[in-house]
Amino acid sequence: MKQLTAILVDDEQHNRQNLSALLTKHCPEIVVLGEAASVPEAFQLINSAKPEVVFLDIEMPNANGFALLELFEELPFKVVFVTAYDAYALKAIKFSASDYILKPIDHSELRNAVENLLEESTPTELNRQSLDSFLNQEEKKIALTLSDEIRLISLAHIVRIEADNNYAKFHLDNGEEVLVSKHLGFYYEIIKDFGFMRVHQSHLINQKFVDRYVKRDGGYLQLTNGHQVPISRTQKENLLKWFSSL
């Protein structure tokens, strides 16, 4: 039986215990070498134990799971994200995770993830193949968790996102508005590399819907749907650089 060594990274002990128990019961191919509750602990454990797989939580105090991955120029291990935050899916793919499992963990999904790990090539090859495949996809989507459903929204249909206190309001190209209970900065970190620009503390726009930059009245963007979006002084230089690069 082929085996893979692994570590578990999650700031909550009961989550690590639950995952460890599920792996023991349903995935005997995974040999758990240790656990970590933070990014510094995980970094030290990875360098000492040299696991083949890291089961990684995303939302942790002080530094999230992506901060751990950014410490490595090339990942010497495979990554399986285990998280309750589905909106991180795009960024997880950007980092070329081997798999992505939502909490609470379904043992069949965990089993499928491990089977995929056993079939994969080396981490470096996998990361490049996975990333290239994602970038070549015609339609990229983001998952938005609402009170009674999870909506998959194509990035191509998002005109802009507007801060609304601790909420974010998505303005779609069909005129629909979707209000989500997470702040604007949360989504900026996920989609900033996919044609979106923050032009104001309260506004994130899809560059493909920009119609013109109007200099009067302090400066604002006219979008193709007729919306006018203000530009902050701090973002004006970045905006002008973007226009000059077209």
Image: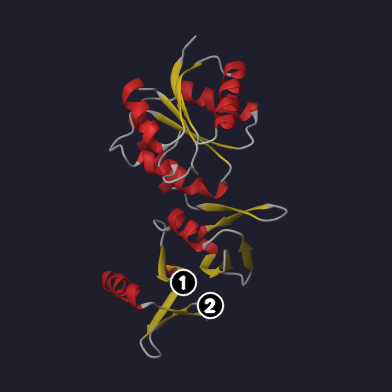
Residue 192 image offset from top left, x and y in percent: 41, 58
Question: Which residue is identified by label 1?
Answer: 209
Left or right: residue 149 compared with residue 227? right
Q: Classify 44 as above or below 230.
A: above
Left or right: residue 36 compared with residue 240? right
SS assignment at label 1 = helix
What residue is rendered at 60% in x and 21% in y? 21
Question: Which residue is identified by label 2?
Answer: 225
Mark 2 closeness class: few <14, some 14–19, many ≥20 residues within 10 Å: some
- Give the quadrant of the C terminus: bottom left
What residue is rendered at 66% in x and 56% in y? 146
What residue is rendered at 53% in x and 61% in y? 183
Mark 1 closeness class: few <14, some 14–19, many ≥20 residues within 10 Å: many
**Label 2–label 1 contact, CB within 8 A:** yes
SS assignment at label 2 = loop
Residue 198 image offset from top left, x and y in percent: 41, 67
The residue most toward the top is: 1
Residue 104 image offset from top left, x and y in percent: 64, 36
Q: CA distance from mark 2 to mark 1?
A: 8 Å
